[in-house]
Amino acid sequence: MSVAIITGGGSGIGKSVAIALSKAGYSVALSGRRQETLDTVAEEIKSAGGAALAVRSDVADPEDVSALFDKTIEAFGRVDLLFNNAGTFGRSGLLEDLSVEDWKAVVDVNLTGVFFCTQAAFRVMKSQDPMGGRIINNGSISAQTPRPNSAPYTATKHAITGLTKSTSLDGRKYDIACGQIDIGNAVTEMTSGMSKGVPQADGSLKAEPAMAVENVANAVLYMASLPLDANVLSMTVMTTKMPFVGRG
C-alpha cells in the first residue's frame, strides 16, 4: 500500500485530496495546526475502511516536520507521496504598509515550510526500499499572475515554482518526481469570500466563479497515479469562466 503525507490536511483542498487518495488505496498522514479537524478527517477515512494518521504540526517548525515524518514511518513504514498543501493568504494590504510580521507569517508557512517538508521527504525517499517517491506542491494561479495587494502571498507562490523545478532536478538521482498544481477558485473555507467580491487589477471589486474542490482532488490523484518515470511538472486547474486569462 502506498503512503501519502498531506499538509494542511484538516480542511479544504487538503481534506478533499486526502479522502481521494484514501479511496485510491493510499494510507494517509494528515498534518495541520488543529488537532480536532485532523482527527475528524482521519475518522471519516477510517470509517470508510481507509488508514489514516492525524499529526498536529506546524510546517514552519523543522522539529514538527521531523516528528511528522517519523510518526508516518512508524505507522506506515515509508512515504511515497508528499502533498505540500499547507498555506496562508496572509493579511491583504498595501505593499508599503505591510509589516515585517505580515511578511514573515506568509513566507514561513508558504515557502520555508514547503522547503522543510521537501527536505524531510528527500531524506526518507532516497533511503527507503524501493527508493523514490513523488512530491506535489500546491502553487496557485498567483504563482503565474498576482492579485492586487498580495505581495507576500504572490512572492511565495512564484518561489514555489522555482522550488518545484529545483526539487524535480535534484530528485532525479533518487527517483523522486516533483510537480506543481496551480489552482483557481476551488470552493473551500479560505475562498468563501470570493462570491461576495474579489479585488481586480482595475481597482474594481467583482464576484468570481468557483468550482468544486473535488476537481482539484481528481487532478492531484492523476498526478500521483503516474509511474515515477513520468511527471506532470506543472498543471493549472481553474474555473472555466474566471477572469484569470483575460486582461485586467
Image: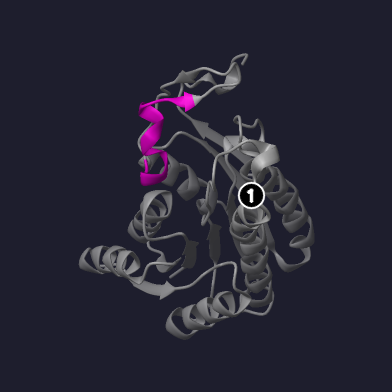
- In the picture, residue 229 is in which quadrant? bottom right
- Image coordinates of residue 139 in percent, x first then y, are 60, 45
Q: Amino acid at mark 1?
A: Gly
- Which residue is found at the position 42% from the left and 49% from the top? 13
Depth check, front residue: 156 or 165: 156
Q: Is residue 46 left or right of residue 125?
A: left
Depth check, front residue: 40 or 36: 36
Judging from the image, the colouring scheme is one colour
- Image coordinates of residue 216 in percent, x first then y, are 44, 42
Mark 1 lies on residue = 179
Task: Report whether residue 233 is seen.
Answer: no
Identify the image quadrant of the N terminus. bottom left
Q: Is residue 64 above or below residue 155?
A: below
Residue extent of the magenta highlight: 188-198
Depth check, front residue: 95 or 72: 95
- Please tell me whether residue 149 belongs to the stretch shown in magenta: no
